[in-house]
Image (tube, helix red, strand yellow):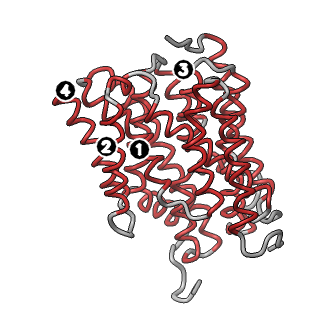
Amino acid sequence: MQGMAGQRFHDRKDAFWSGIRDGAGAPAIVLFAGMVGFGAMGRTNGLDIWFTSFTSIFMFALPGQVVLLEMAVSGSSFVAIALAVTLTATRFVTMTVTLFPQFHKDDRNRRLYASVHLLAMTAWAISMREFHAIEAKHRWSYFVGLGLLCWLISIPGTILGFFLAGSVPTYITLGLILINPLFFLLTFTEVKPWANRIAIMLGCAFGPMFYLLHRESSLLSTGLVAGTIAYFIDRKFFRKKPGVIG
Amino acid sequence: MHTVLQGWGLWLALIGACIGTYICRAIGVMLSGRINQESEIFRWVAAVTYAMVAALTVRMILLPIGLLATVPLWIRLLICILSVGVMMSRPTRRLVPALLTGTLLMVTYGVIH
């Protein structure tokens, strides 16, 4: 398929701008809404604008940002917070490992350590869908355009949410702070692997119990207990060929 | 009611969270092309992550802190069920309509109340 009708892009600049255009649609709206919701959560939980927007600039990972905010508000120690947030970020390891080998080998240099910060769910999903139809030497430029747009819209999104929550009527703020829990809940319906589905169900069941037992450590303990049980249930009952090395 | 992490602790948590998040991205770059993403450790880590995010989501809906706590539990649950219903009503992606449904219903509740 690749190179069948020549190249999709003339040059790197073309690929970069095409990445920006592809990002500016429904996925970016959802991301923007999530960031607005996060900004509103920061405001209603009594955090300042710097803290709230710094998380979007330097973490750029909504689940981790929400974990940070919720744990900070419920008074967890900073070590527990850093650990829990890092665990939520482990998905970036798998995301990078699947995406980055598709770049041209000339682009696989130290600059990737800078551009990887632009990698998050939205840019990853679009890139995985589009890369097969893009010649290897233009993939990196396309990804940078796409990722940069997603990152750059998150920052005004967060700031907007923060100030909206302080100035609009309470009923609007209610809608804004519902966006993130609802978004996570809705994405669960699209999860396919059984291990992850079981993990979600067990996490939902154990989460509130562990929270009532010991609030500060409940996210970590629920994740480890429910995730490990789900992993073993999947391994024992749902996998066709256990222990196979692909 | 609850103790909010403050001052240095809060910023240390932020720095720790940023570094932890970046390290995961950097490890991905380091390993890219050299590791099998179907390996057992990745499966386990993915399960733990989903369980954590699920626990967080349920907690934010069932036992929220702050403004959402002023909305009765059954309203919160009803709105979530209706949104998931919109999401599942068609096999194609309906994330934006489902998200809008939930948000607008919550705003409507706020207006009525």
Give the residue at mark 3.
A73
Position of residue A127 measured from the top left corner of the image (x, y, whole percent): 55, 64
Give the residue at mark 4.
B113
Answer left or right for B7 relative to B37. Answer: left
How many numbered marks are there? 4
Please give the chain letter of the residue carrying mark 2.
B
For marks 3 and 4, give the CA distance.
Answer: 27 Å
Q: Residues within 10 Å of mark 2 (few under 14, many from 20)?
A: many
Does dot 2 land on a helix, a strand or a loop?
helix
Q: Nearer the viewer, mark 2 or mark 1?
A: 2
Three-letter amino acid code at disc 3? Val
Give the residue at mark 2.
B79
- Label 2 with label 1: CB-CB less than 8 Å: yes
At horizontal 42% and vertical 55% (from top left) the residue drawn is: A27
Answer left or right for B107 relative to A221. Answer: left
For marks 2 and 1, give the CA distance.
Answer: 9 Å
Q: Residue A198, located in which quarter of the rendered image?
A: bottom right
Q: Residue A11, located in which quarter of the rendered image?
A: bottom right
Three-letter amino acid code at disc 4? His
Q: Quadrant of the N terminus of chain A?
A: bottom right
Q: Residue A68, located in which quarter of the rendered image?
A: top right
At horizontal 30% and vertical 55% (from top left) the residue drawn is: B97
Position of residue B18 measured from the top left corner of the image (x, y, whole percent): 66, 33
Q: Disc number at residue A182?
A: 1
Tell me: residue A66, above or below residue A128: above
